[in-house]
Image (tube, rainbow, N blue to C red):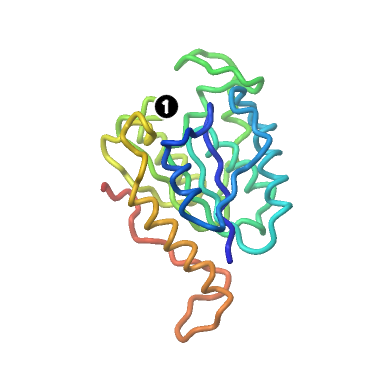
Amino acid sequence: MATLLIVPGFGGSGPLHWQSWIAQKYESAIWVNDLPLLEPKIHIWANAIDRAIDQIEGEILILAHSFGCLATSLAIAHHPQRIAAAILVAPASPARFSENGHILPEHDGAKTIKHLLPKHALGVAGLVIASENDPWMPFNQAAKLAKVFGLPTINLGLSGHINVDSGHGQWPLIDVLIGNFLHQLDAKEQPVANACPSNEIPRPDIFHKRI
């Protein structure tokens, strides 16, 4: 069975957050431990994700939110062969974070973590889910980041930061998407007629589709 590895965002995901809801629904779900949740230092976060990956056998689907998406992209670049798929929800703008973990005002002019992120496709299947009124990342920037990462984008419309404050506690859409990816990953190990090549996962045809 594929493992669902959950990476929260800055400040963590409380009990009412959709990530906590998902963690309770899926037997294979585990959280990344040892994250300094109130210190968004991307290298420390990426290293914690690295350690979690090293302890997992078999296929991995990463489910990340906000700043966790940025750290996840760096961790995937460290493990290009270990991660099968990633769902990145409401990625925060790298322009809002400094290397030493400070949260920066928009257009601050200080050195940010943008130069630390991968500049090429991550080489995994997956999705970026973004919102048109996310205070942490304008949708057009999220779509550009997704293109760099080689991932299709779902436009969730006016959904804020896709968190508890925007009404995303029990979130059926993410449940369906996770279930589909996990099913496809588990099916990779079982030969079936007309199956996709073992190194590919079908990507939903939802590039820049608004839901």
The three-letter code of the residue at mark 1 reads Trp
Q: Is 18 or 24 nearer to us in this picture?
A: 24
For residue 117, above or below residue 82: above
* Quadrant of the image containing the N terminus: bottom right
User: Looking at the rendering, which quadrant does residue 124 occupy?
Assistant: bottom right
- The x, y position of residue 93, in whole percent, is 48, 29
User: Looking at the rendering, which quadrant does residue 34 occupy?
Assistant: top right
Read off the residue under disc 1: 136
- The x, y position of residue 63, in whole percent, is 51, 47
Toward the bottom, the furthest residue is 193
Regarding mark 1 in the picture, which secondary structure is present there? loop
Left or right relative to 53: residue 113: left
Q: How many marks?
A: 1
Residue drawn at x 65%, y 54% as measured from the top left: 80
- The x, y position of residue 145, in whole percent, is 47, 40
Left or right relative to 209: residue 13: right
Residue drawn at x 51%, y 74% as measured from the top left: 187
Residue drawn at x 73%, y 52% as measured from the top left: 54
- The x, y position of residue 169, in whole percent, is 37, 39
Q: Is 179 or 123 nearer to us in this picture?
A: 179
For residue 88, above or below residue 206: above
Q: Residues within 10 Å of mark 1 (few under 14, many from 20)?
A: many
Residue drawn at x 37%, y 36% as measured from the top left: 162
Q: Is 44 or 56 nearer to us in this picture?
A: 56
